[in-house]
Amino acid sequence: MRVKLVFYFLLVILFPTITITLLGNLMYRNSMGDEQNINTQQMIKQISGNIDFYIRDTENIINYLSNDPKVLRFLNSDEVNNNSNDSTINNDAYSSINSFVKLHPEMAGIMIVNENDVYVSDIMYRISRDPLTNERWYLKAIQNPKSINLFSKPVGRNINNVFNYCADEVVSMSKAVIDNRTGKCVGVILIDMKLDVIKQVIENVKPGKTGFVYITDSEGEIVYSPVNSIVYRIDKQWFSDKNSEIAIKKIKGKDYEIMNTASEYTKWKTIGVFPLDEIQKVITYVKYYSLIIAVITLILAGILAIFFTRSIIRPITKLRMLMKMAEEGNLNVHFNNKYNDEIGELGNSFNTMIKEIKTLINLVQVEEKKKRKAEISTLQAQIKPHFLYNTLDTIQWMAKEKEAEEIAQMVSNLSSLLRTGLNNGDEIIRLRGEIKHVESYLMIQKVRYENKLNYEISIDRNILDYNVIKLMLQPLVENAIYHGIKEKRGQGKIVILGNLENNKIHIKVIDNGIGISESKLEMINLLLKGNGSATNKLGYGIFNVNERIRLNYGNEYGLTYSSVYGQGTTVDLWHPVV
């Protein structure tokens, strides 16, 4: 019962614990992945938006300069040339450029070139005499006069600046200047922006601990990337599909999740790269700690289940032990009731039952004693022992007076038989007296049956003074005469043997009578072992002898019959040494 209760408790606790743990981990993993993707996408869009902001701000500066009268006068004037640096027109244009440079430290330089290949700049200058109007940035601006043109890593230009910024440190932007009056392109404005601005935007936001973000231009070339060996193993063809914003690729044996977002304005792509094992590591930690918590919960639940079931089972176990003791015959048991529940009610019922059983047993014992005393008193009152003995002595004396010796002997034997049988009401007699009693009975029966009956008694002298239950041999001899020898033709004989065997008194009553059939013999022995009532089949005397011995000394003692039909019967009587 304890095992069942503990099992049911653990089963009830185990099922929801495992379900919650597994579903919780699964939901957390999915939620974690989705949340990570959403956060990364928002972060990449934020970076892309910030870069767009700086590019738009730079384009606005170009637009301001394109509408500045001083710049327009420089672009439309035929007086300026590359050798007239001190002219007023050049100085005015330079002052306009310088005013913006002071307010925007992220700019690495501004250059304005007109269609006559004349330029003005703050810190940028021509390297060779080759015309600037043949430069890629100039021609592309003329071809797309309404759009901003971006150039990452501007190498091979005929331009340098006083700070010697290399191509990896700047991003170039060029846009054509349109004269509103004529609608004609009168020149191009070129601005170099420091990559430190993009670097600062990217470095402030990182996807995870080991992830990174980098920027590519419309042709897939890297605009800016932090120092990382992974970025050069990323194929730009992975992002050829504009609808594909998330890709999972294996790089150097590790799975990476790669997200990108393209700017409609700059056509640049902002790409975020982070290893999947970071998410898996967090999920593994959560799963690990969830399992630990689940195991600890189950252990605590098991301990509590054992404790609670023990408090339930303990009184039931105690009650069961008391019932077992009562079943074995110990009625001096009592259930100490301290439980105000169903178990307490069972305990009260058990105590009441034991009390009633003891009361009934006492009543039966008292009734039996009264019954026995009444039977003896009745017998004694009917027989009047002293009167009977005196009468028999008188008859014996008169028989001897008339010289009727046989009659006198029979009267003497009858007197002895009755005296031993009554024995002053005692149940116990010495074996010597029991032998004398059965011998008197045999002598009376021998007179009756004359030569048909003979007998022999051989008892070990060492056991004659032991106490035995009285009147245990006479019924056996009587049964042997009436059911064995009487039915036999010819002379019959009864032999009584007695000795000490296995520390028990063993007496045999042997006759050479008609014997008992095998089926009846089996039935007699079963009845003598207590399997039914023997009074109808055996006769009251034999059953009474067997029951008195067994009731007084236990089932290992009593009678056992053995017989061969047509040859005779043997009764083994076992009696303890008393």
Image: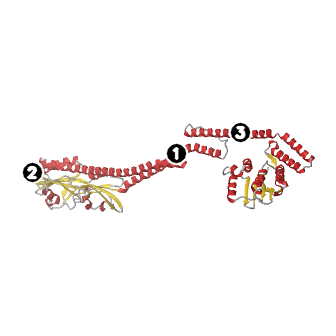
Give me the C-alpha separation between circle 3 and circle 1: 55 Å
Q: Nearer the viewer, residue 514 or 475?
A: 514
> How would you rate the neighbour count of disc 1 (Cα within 10 Å): few for under 14, some for 14-19, many for 20 or more?
some
Q: Nearer the viewer, residue 255 or 349?
A: 349
Residue farthest along the left direction in this orientation:
182
Q: Amino acid at mark 3?
A: Glu
Tell me the residue at 35%/51% (across/down). Answer: 32
Q: Quick one: label 3 or label 1, which is nearer the N terminus?
A: 1
Q: Amino acid at mark 2?
A: Asp
Q: Nearer the viewer, residue 363 or 37?
A: 363
- The image's colouring method is secondary structure
Q: Quadrant of residue 150?
A: bottom left
Can residue 235 be seen here? The reply is: yes
Across the whole image, how many numbered discs are drawn on residues? Answer: 3
With 396 as the anchor, is 24 left or right in this view? left
Q: Quick one: label 2 or label 1, which is nearer the N terminus?
A: 2
With 419 as the anchor, is 185 left or right in this view? left
Give me the C-alpha separation between circle 2 and circle 1: 90 Å
Q: The residue tagged with tag 3: helix, strand or loop?
A: helix
Q: The residue tagged with tag 1: helix, strand or loop?
A: helix
Residue designated by label 1: 304
> How would you rate the neighbour count of disc 2 (Cα within 10 Å): few for under 14, some for 14-19, many for 20 or more?
some
Residue designated by label 3: 367
Residue farthest along the front direction in this orientation:
402
Residue designated by label 2: 179
Residue 327: horizontal and vertical position, in percent?
Answer: 64, 46
